[in-house]
Amino acid sequence: MPISPQTIRAVDTYLTAHPIASGPLIRSYQFPTRRLHPDTVSLIASKTMRDAGVKQRAWDGKSAHAGRHTFATLRE
């Protein structure tokens, strides 16, 4: 999957601030060796989409899960 230069910079910045040799890339700050629970990822994505004006209400078809399907099927 292609990754934009902006995404690479963001990941590099994240790993500089939160280094790890192995394990999940996006992880709990409370338990750094553990991954984030899928419900936590969904809540973060929903809040981000609401703040950006993308998500208007619950069950509007705009979710982390819907995004996953979209990204998996997009072709460049």
Image (cartoon, helix red, strand yellow):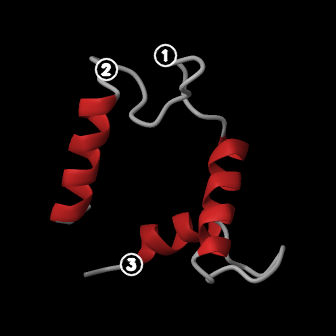
Q: Residue at x 61, y 60 (%)?
A: 45
SS at mark 3?
A: loop
Q: Is residue 42 above or below residue 52?
A: above
Amino acid type at image mark 1: Thr
Quarter of the view holding residue 4: bottom left
Residue 12, image x and y in percent?
Answer: 21, 42
Label 3 crowd (10 A; few <14 / some 14-19 / many >=20): few
First-in-chain label (2 vs 1): 2
Picture residue at 55% right of the left edge, 69% below the top: 67
Q: Could you say which disc has been placed on residue 33 in the image? A: 1
Q: Which residue corresponds to mark 3?
A: 74
* Residue that carries the numbered disc 2 in the rendered image: 20
Task: Give the answer, above or below, for where 73 lies relative to 29.
Answer: below
Amino acid type indicated by mark 3: Leu
Picture coordinates of residue 37, whole percent (x, y): 66, 35
- Whether pointer 3 and pointer 2 mark residues with C-beta atoms closer than 8 Å, the reply is no
Q: Judging from the image, what secondary structure is the residue with disc 1 in?
A: loop
Q: Residue at x 67, y 68 (%)?
A: 63
Q: Amino acid at mark 2?
A: Ile
| Residue 2 in view here | no
